[in-house]
Amino acid sequence: MPKQILIVDDDKELTAEITEILEGEGFDIDVACDGLKGAQMAKAAHYDVIFLDIKMPGINGIELLREIKQYNHTSKVFLVSGNPFLEKLAAQENLTGLIAGLISKPFDIEDLITRLKSA
Amino acid sequence: MEQPSLNVLVIEDSTADFRLLKEQLSSQSLVDFRLTHAKTLKEGLALLPTEKIDTVLLDLDLPDSNRVDTLQKVRESNPALAVIVLTGLASEEIGVDALVKGAQDYLVKGQIQPDALVRSIRYAIERKKSEAALMRVRDEWERTFNSVPDMIAILDDRHNIVRVNNSMAKHLALKPEECIGKPCYRYIHGLDKPHDPCPHFATLRDGKEHVQEIREDRLGMDLLVSTTPLMDNSGKMIGSVHVARDITLHKQAEGILKRDKEVVEDIVKERTKELMAAHIELDKARRLSDIGTLAATVAHELRNPLAAIRMATYNIKRKKKDLPIDSHLVNIEKKVAESDQIINNLLFYSRLRVSHFEEINIYECLNECIELSEKQYQEQEAVVEKQIQSIQAKIIHADPLQIKEVFNNILNNAFDAVADRKGRVVVKAELNASDTLRISIEDNGIGMDDEQRQRALEPFFTTKAKGTGLGLSVCSQIIELHNCSLDIASKKDKGTTVTITLPVKQDLNAKTNPYS
């Protein structure tokens, strides 16, 4: 059974492109276009991997991560951001125990695929 | 009108002579002479303190005293008394001698006329009064002269001391009379000739008052010396009054004040400099923080579209295996990477304040950066030569993000520099004895002239057609945060070598988060 992946990001073009790439690699992709929808979808179904963009209107990625982690301990959550100081931010917010990794935009596509396959 | 009276004591052993005198004095009517007779000196001296005596008529040859002592004893007994000496016919020179010794007049016995006698007595009394007044004035002047704390010397026109006051004598460790006739330059200044410039000399030359500050080490004193011309009655200058005032304390206070003023001025200058520097720094920080806020926003906003562009390109490439289109897609990918680097630099430049040191494998870090650049510039076909084996497995303390940023920027510059020619990039790394690493990145590219090289680290300075001019600024800031050095050697059209010297160990104590 292919890996179930949820992508939560408010950039529609970006999610369209990434969905196509990852489906091409054999993953099952669901997309939520904001934090609120992401929260609902993460609750409604189980995903192997969840991508959370940090900067989103409404609920941001970090808030969503904390919410998801209250009831879901098995999904591997990656935080995604254009902020180059993502690691510092994660350390500052004490997120290291909650996340599977950090992914910087713009994605290194090959690296992204490798990490997803091993996740 | 009442007749004025004068009390006259006659000390005369001859009763006959006394009677004669008494007769002569009573024969005139202008003054009422009251005569008292003493036959011996002893008798006379006994009367002097008790009786009110205006004048003494004194015979020097008395039975109880010799000629030499008689006058002196009377004068000592009452110095204010007018004394007229009576001498014998054959000894006029004795009378003259008595005048020298303080008598007011002398009369030769046997030649005394009544009116001359009266005149002599009255003159003697008046002369004595004038003398006393003169003495008083002289004493007063001397007391004043000697009580002045300033050192006063009266000097003649050949620099000899005529007179000094007590203060001057005291400072010269001499008695006032010992100074007289001595050359002032020798006794005051310890010199063989007048010192130059000498205010006394100046006064002698132009007849004017001169004032001068003189440091006299012999006396250990700073002196304010004034010389005022001294004239004789005909108006001819005969010397000067040389007044020296001790201003040592004043000078010391002045010196301290001057030093203090200089110190204060220095402090003010220093503080002003610091303040200006702080002001400039603050201004820069404010500007940077504006840039920082802007850069952070730009980065966040730009990275999403960049990510979408990159992935869209990837998808087109996958779907359409078409070589002519592929080259355009490669260009898009390359430009996305470049844009990302520009964003990185902007962010680093504007937000860099501290480093977070951790243990990193510097060899891997450097190698990774070289490979990234090679990949990014692969169509350039530059030759990359790595001489970095000697630092393999070397662990150093550094901020990995920051140090990669440095390598990336310098490597990208090197590749850009060799873009239009048969390029060669040499990366060398070696361990120094002093626990530092030396990494150099050398290219044979377009190089820089002196002016460009000097400005290379300035923010926003660039020689590239497209560039933010922040790459090396970022590097230099990171280098500074790592306490290391960055050296650029370059020759126009020959190439550039950038050398970084990195300490192996850093203070690992975490600093405040610079990114908050």
Image (cartoon, rainbow, N blue to C red):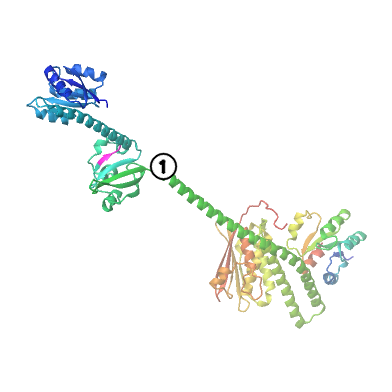
- Residue drawn at the location 56% of the way across and 73% of the way down: B448
Residue B140 is situated, as x and y percent measured from the top left of the image, at 31, 34
- Residue drawn at the location 88% of the way across and 62% of the way down: A38
Relative to A60, is A13 above or below? below
Report whether A83 appears left or right of B97.
right
In which quadrant of the rendered image does the C terminus of chain A lie? bottom right
Residue B136 is situated, as x and y percent measured from the top left of the image, at 28, 33
- Front in this rendered view, residue B47 or B270: B47
- Front in this rendered view, residue B25 or B261: B25
Report whether B421 appears left or right of B347.
left
Please count the marks in the image.
1
Chain to which the residue tagged by mark 1 belongs: B
Residue B219 lies in the magenta-colored region: no
- Residue reaching furthest to the right: A44
Residue type at mark 1 is Leu
User: Which segment did they paint magenta?
Assistant: B162-166
The part of the image, by quadrant, that contains residue B367 is bottom right
Crowd rating for badge 1 (residues with CA inside 10 Å; few <14, some 14–19, many 20+):
few
Residue A106 is situated, as x and y percent measured from the top left of the image, at 76, 68
Report whether B447 appears left or right of A111.
left
Residue B332 is situated, as x and y percent measured from the top left of the image, at 74, 76
- The residue labelled by disc 1 is B249
